[in-house]
């Protein structure tokens, strides 16, 4: 397999080189952070008054964690570390409730962020030969415009179509012979389910690869998308507080997501004890951004659950890899006392060929007990006149789920295309118990 680098020097840096880049970056981030109202007060409480207090990477542990609420409470400018006039871009989180969290970038910050996206895309084999259709929402959300910049700088021809309008997406894919797509995994599945209805044949399209992110998805969903579309799918992770997509990205080996360690320091902690977990164990990802002068954030608790993948990747990059996000520490459902992650349910159902491209998980109260309802779409050929087939499929799905999550769910089967779809991130879990 050919390996493509965009910035070989940094991508193939040795561990010692990466450690030294990180130490310099951390010192710089701390120095700048002290200029902000928030860290100007917060860091001295931990005995940090200048970057000279950071002598080794071990000193990271002396820094306080930062949480989403800290960002909210300091809205709008409490984390700003440079003059407002040096800021060229802001973004805001996609949160639907309360005060948004915002980020700021200088022109240099934006260049650095764009550069790591070039590395991420090039690492999957993308080049100026590609026509890149960006189906992520443009606007305050980082998903659209940030990856747009990376793709454009790499020389891909970018179609900034944004999300939604499935018929137009297909028209552009066909007319411009799009070779690469960026979309949520749920939208990639939805798009496929609409292809026939919109009169498009796979052979009309030139698609080769897709970048998916912005929402949790299992390995089985990746395989499903790859098989349906007959393309390569790469996982792209990020969050708005850390400049959005691509802070961790799969290379052509698709064996975990490399975190660009010259720009971020990743830690994985036990969310209860706040101590690091053992190498290879799951915990909460904590990130420190090193290359954003306008707004450093130190030790940000992402709430995302993952683990470091031990060992080295075959691609030669030593930037550590995280596993695909298993879920968020705050999206776990507790059903009659049993912890269930939506990702466990997805894994089971998406492995079954009869299951279609969309599903919905609902938790309800049933008297004093909890009830878990799993609604899944099924493929067209499953719907026959013989209801016995449907009963047996329902029973098999319930049985498979029971084996994995230790709970007996109520399974409902729905026709392809009948469950709700959202334009941005899929909303697949509805907890009606507290409404
Ligand atoms: O979703 C940034 C992004 C855009 C990433 C496009 C990738 C592609 P937020 O709206 O702030 O930013 O949401 C961040 O989405 O904390 C995760 O819980 C989840 N998430 C993002 N990417 C992945 C992924 C963008 N590849 C939150 N796998 C994060 C699983 C993901 N979850």
Image: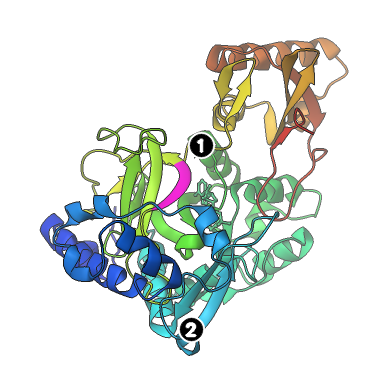
Is 269 situated left or right of 157 in this image?
left
Q: Which residue is mark 2?
A: 87
Q: Is residue 341 above or below residue 424?
A: above
* Range of magenta residues: 300-304
Q: Residue furthest bottom?
A: 85
Disc number for residue 342: none
Q: Please tell me which of labels 1 and 2 falls first in the chain.
A: 2
Cβ atoms under marks 1 and 2 closer than 8 Å: no
Q: Position of residue 215 (x, y in %)?
A: 57, 47
For the point 67% across and 46% down, the residue is: 426
Decide which of 228, 145 is in the foreground and name it. 145
> Which is the main secondary structure of the residues drawn in magenta?
strand
Q: Which residue is mark 1?
A: 329
For the point 54% across and 65% down, the residue is: 74
Q: Is residue 181 visible?
A: no
Q: Residue furthest right?
A: 385
From the Cβ of disc 1, is ligand 1 less than 8 Å away?
Answer: no
Q: Position of residue 228 (x, y in %)?
A: 60, 42
Q: Position of residue 180 (x, y in %)?
A: 53, 62
Q: CA distance from mark 1 to mark 2?
A: 33 Å
Is 78 situated left or right of 421 in this image?
left
Assign the C terminus to one quadrant of the image. top right
Q: Is residue 269 above or below residue 22?
A: above
The answer to which quarter of the image holds residue 6 is bottom left
For the point 49% across and 61% down, the residue is: 241
Q: Position of residue 335 (x, y in %)?
A: 64, 19
From the Cβ of disc 2, is ligand 1 less than 8 Å away?
Answer: no
């Amino acid at each position: 397999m050919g390996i493509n680098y965009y910035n070989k020097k940094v991508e193939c840096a040795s561990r010692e080189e990466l450690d030294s880049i990180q130490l310099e970056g951390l010192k710089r981030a701390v120095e700048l952070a002290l200029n902000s109202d928030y860290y100007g007060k917060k860091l001295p409480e931990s005995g940090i008054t200048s970057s000279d207090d950071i002598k080794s990477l071990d000193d990271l542990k002396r820094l306080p964690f930062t949480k989403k609420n800290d960002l909210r409470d300091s809205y709008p400018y409490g984390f700003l570390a440079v003059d407002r006039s040096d800021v060229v871009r802001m973004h805001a989180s996609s949160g639907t409730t309360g005060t948004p969290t915002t980020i700021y970038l200088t022109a240099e910050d934006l260049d650095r962020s764009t550069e790591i996206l070039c590395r991420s895309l090039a690492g999957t084999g993308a080049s100026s030969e590609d026509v890149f259709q960006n189906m992520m929402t443009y606007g305050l959300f980082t998903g659209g415009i940030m990856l747009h910049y990376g793709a454009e700088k790499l020389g891909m021809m970018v179609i900034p179509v944004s999300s939604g309008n499935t018929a137009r997406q297909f028209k552009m894919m066909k007319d411009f012979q799009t070779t690469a797509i960026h979309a949520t995994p749920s939208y990639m599945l939805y798009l496929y389910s609409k292809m026939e209805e919109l009169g498009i044949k796979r052979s009309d399209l030139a698609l080769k690869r897709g970048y998916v992110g912005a929402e949790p998805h299992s390995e089985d969903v990746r395989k499903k998308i790859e098989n349906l579309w007959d393309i390569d799918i790469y996982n792209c992770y990020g969050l708005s507080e850390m400049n959005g997509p691509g802070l961790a990205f799969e290379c052509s080996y698709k064996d975990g997501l490399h975190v660009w360690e010259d720009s971020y320091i990743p830690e994985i902690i036990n969310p209860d004890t706040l101590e690091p977990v053992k190498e290879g164990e799951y915990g909460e990802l904590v990130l420190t951004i090193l290359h954003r002068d306008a707004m450093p954030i130190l030790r940000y608790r992402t709430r995302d659950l993952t683990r470091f993948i031990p060992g080295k990747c075959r691609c030669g990059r030593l930037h550590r890899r995280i596993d695909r996000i298993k879920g968020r520490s705050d999206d776990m459902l507790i059903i009659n006392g049993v912890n269930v992650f939506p990702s466990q349910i997805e894994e089971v159902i998406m492995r079954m060929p009869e299951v279609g491209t969309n599903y919905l998980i609902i938790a309800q109260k049933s008297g004093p007990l909890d009830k878990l309802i799993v609604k899944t779409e099924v493929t067209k050929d499953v719907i026959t006149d013989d209801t016995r087939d449907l009963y047996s499929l329902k029973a098999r799905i319930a049985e498979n789920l029971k084996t994995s999550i230790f709970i007996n769910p109520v399974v409902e089967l729905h026709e392809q295309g009948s469950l709700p779809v959202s334009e941005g991130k899929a909303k697949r879990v509805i907890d009606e118990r507290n409404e």
